[in-house]
Image (spheres, helix red, strand yellow):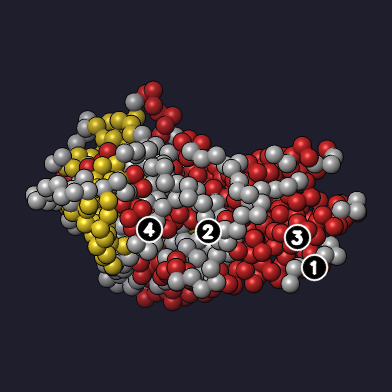
Amino acid sequence: MARFHDLTVTDIQKTIRDAVVVTLKPETAEAGAFDFTQGQYLTFRHDFDGEELRRSYSICAGKDDGVLQVGIKRVDGGAFSTWANEDLKVGDTLQAMSPMGTFHTPLDPGAARQYLGFAGGSGITPVLSILKTVLAREPKSAFTLVYANKGVNTIMFREELEDLKNLYMGRLNIIHVLETDAQEIDLFTGLVTEEKCGELFRHWIDIEAVDTAFICGPEPMMLGIAAALRAHGLEDGQIKFELFASAQPGRLKRRVVSKDAADSANQTAAAITLDGATQTVTMGKDSTILDAALQNAMDAPYACKAGVCSTCRCRVLEGEVEMVANHALEDYEVEKGYVLSCQSYPLTDRVVVDYDQ
Amino acid sequence: MSEEMRIEDYLAKGGVLSNPANVPPRYRAELLKLMASFVDSELAGAAGFADIINQGPGIKERIAAARIVLEKTDHADRVLRIMGEFGADTARYANHHPWTARLARDADIGATRGEHDMRLAVFNYPLTGWADAVMMNLLMGRAVGVQMADFALVSYQPLAEAFRAIAPVEARHAELAEEGVARLIAAGETETLTDSLSYWWPRVAASFGQMSSPKTESLKAMGLRHASNAELKARWEAEAGQVLGRLGLSAPA
């Protein structure tokens, strides 16, 4: 189960107008819980007006930087990122889980590998962690970074990357691709698409020598790059992805508890939504929501039927249910109305549940 | 970057997801189901095989069987850990169900799963002895190989990576079974093996599910499946048929 630890904010730096780099220090006794692998992310939680939000941000520090740092870019309408950019101060306490994620490959000090990284906008954060770490720990390896941004003034870590280029002369190659700002070379203007990659692989990047590619950016960019890499002979095992979708769920509305929840016998009318279709079924109050759905030929998801695995999770939008066992959902999910349908019995005469939320 | 794309479209175009934070709810459910099915099958398979270890005719056979039990349990652990990142209580999960439980040998459940776990139907049947276990392991090992090839392409990257690591070890289990069958044939056990073959062949075949499943299309759109049940089953029939041919046996008609 998820466990959160306290971290103290020791520094906040603006890297561009709407992004900050936050340095964090774990409690001394818990430092081991934050021994990260390059490319991993931290999941934070914070309470906004009584509602808990969780957001994941990649660690941008390298293994040898001696600090724990994440980059947080403000997203329009994003409660957490706006708060981190505008209100967070040095000395504040943040709560985060131990680092997670598999966006990395094992290091080998004796290896002479060719890495290729693609980053779009704030997707640079885990890629920066990886490139700093491999350049420091694999002295014979080289890294090429293709870094896509809107314009010059939205490039996160621009100066730090220049410094790294000087530090690792000849081993770090950076190609900036800018969507709107014109550059000397036409190829470096526009979006990083499959075609653009094809052209880069013709003249600028020796794709046949590449051992591993890392991609972190928005969905269409990742698809285009992955297609180009596969077309040039890379296997799936050589391509590592990290997607922090713009689609991280937004703020959720509270569930409605209907007023006319008077008792009428032991029957409940349950409106169950699954795969976009809603079916209203009459069920006994001694039956679980999951069983009611299954008995009515709905292909509701489940696995353990013991409240352990969370496969059957759904959201109660109206009415009330009693969840008799819960070993998988956390308090903040329960507060938002999520229940394990295999353990949930209706209490009100009408309930509305949704498996699609 | 100003490009916007719905996550469903991203998946339908072959996109890959990498952590629990950005999986849509229905994807989450189907992914957990897929993982639970794998974990339950491995745990039930290992538990059933554990009882057979001591029936191995020699030390080498017992080592092979013990190794299979160890490695299948390890594979369950690897995938269960990924379920844990979605909130599953991994310690409780491993013990919430008696994995050794089996139905009667002549129960006829087709492809139906049990009420309380997601193991493939075939793992609900009991093994009758060493030769029976080796034959079951040979046929199921080949089925796992076919399924693994599809699983390795799954759109949830941490799981795809786990399956890529698991696949060669599972392939080795099928090879051990083939060596085991060869030894049993040399020892004159062909008749027992043929009986087991006709018992397990249709049951392993049924583990590929219904031949026209409306579910497959939606799973394909999410990148959780690539081939259809019928395609996977046909692949298994061809591959298992070849192995049996090498051993001088043939698949039941």
Residue A319 is left or right of residue B12, and the answer is left
Residue found 60% across the figure and 68% down from its top:
B232
Q: Is the residue under label 2 in contact with that under label 4 (CB below 8 Å)? A: no
Q: Residue furthest top?
A: A29
When the figure is inspected, residue A99 is found, relative to residue B119, above or below; the finding is above
Distance of mark 1 from mark 2, alpha carbons? 27 Å
Crowd tier of the residue under label 1, counting other residues whose Cα lies within 10 Å: few below 14, some 14–19, many 20 or above: some
Number of the label disc, if any, that sits on residue A216: none
State the residue in front, A41 or B35: B35
* Residue hosting label 2: B112
| Foreground label between 1 and 2 | 2
Q: Is the residue under label 3 in contact with that under label 4 (CB below 8 Å)? A: no
* Residue hosting label 3: B197
* Residue hosting label 4: A294
Crowd tier of the residue under label 3, counting other residues whose Cα lies within 10 Å: few below 14, some 14–19, many 20 or above: many
Q: Earlier in the sequence, mark 1 or mark 2?
A: 2
Point out the image quarter for the C terminus of chain B: bottom right
Q: Chain of mark 1?
A: B
How far across and how far down the image is residue A174, in percent? 43, 59
* Residue hosting label 1: B250
Residue found 83% across the figure and 38% down from its top:
B59
Kind of residue sitting beneath label 2 = Thr
Residue B60 is left or right of residue A16, and the answer is right
Residue found 35% across the figure and 67% down from its top:
B8
Q: Chain of mark 3?
A: B
Image quadrant in which you'd find residue B6: bottom left
Label 1 element class: loop
Residues at marks 2 and 3, common chain? yes
Q: Is residue B81 visible?
A: yes
When the figure is inspected, residue A287 is found, relative to residue A184, above or below; the finding is above
